[in-house]
Amino acid sequence: MSGHTPEEIHHHVKIYIRVFAALAALTVLTVGVSYIKLPVMAAILVALFIATIKSSLVAAFFMHLANEKKIIYWILLPAVAFFLVLLVLISYS
């Protein structure tokens, strides 16, 4: 047995449902923004902003990174920095 009380489980389920609702709303927002006639660069920036929020929600709650110790962020920071450097290098070539 995991030792979790029914109240703890209910609390976690409520959080998961809220995160799912936020992801669904952001998906609808992404589709709605795609129908707006924006310049290509602005459309890409808006889509990337919404995707960043969605991926942060998934990582924080479904991958349980919200409860991790601070050391995990310092371990992941170089990977994120490397990814951003690669994106910038690719966009300039």
Image (cartoon, grey):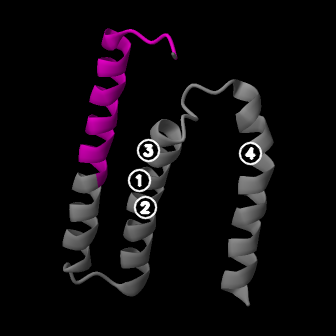
| SS at mark 1 in the image | helix
Residue 29 image-quadrant placement: bottom left
Which kind of residue does numbered mark 3 sit on? Leu
Q: Are marks 3 and 1 in contact (CB under 8 Å)?
A: yes
Q: Are marks 3 and 2 in contact (CB under 8 Å)?
A: no
Other residues around mark 2 within 10 Å, as few (<14) / some (14–19) / many (≥20): some
Q: Identify the disc placed on residue 36.
A: none
Task: Give left or right: position of 31 versus 50.
Answer: left
Residue drawn at point x = 23 percent, y = 45 percent: 21
Residue drawn at point x = 43 percent, y = 51 percent: 53
Q: Identify the disc placed on residue 76.
A: 4
| SS at mark 3 in the image | helix
Say whether residue 3 is magenta: yes
Q: Identify the disc placed on residue 57.
A: 3
Say whether residue 20 is magenta: yes
Between 52 and 16, the residue placed more toward the observer is 16
Q: Are marks 4 and 1 in contact (CB under 8 Å)?
A: no
Which kind of residue does numbered mark 1 sit on? Lys
Residue for badge 2? 51
Residue farthest toward the front in the current orientation of the protein? 1
User: Which of disc 2 and disc 3 is earlier in sequence?
Assistant: 2
Which kind of residue does numbered mark 4 sit on? Leu
Distance in Å between CA atoms under marks 4 and 1: 18 Å
Which kind of residue does numbered mark 2 sit on? Ala
In magenta, the rendered stretch is 2-23
Residue 57 image-quadrant placement: top left
Residue for badge 1? 54
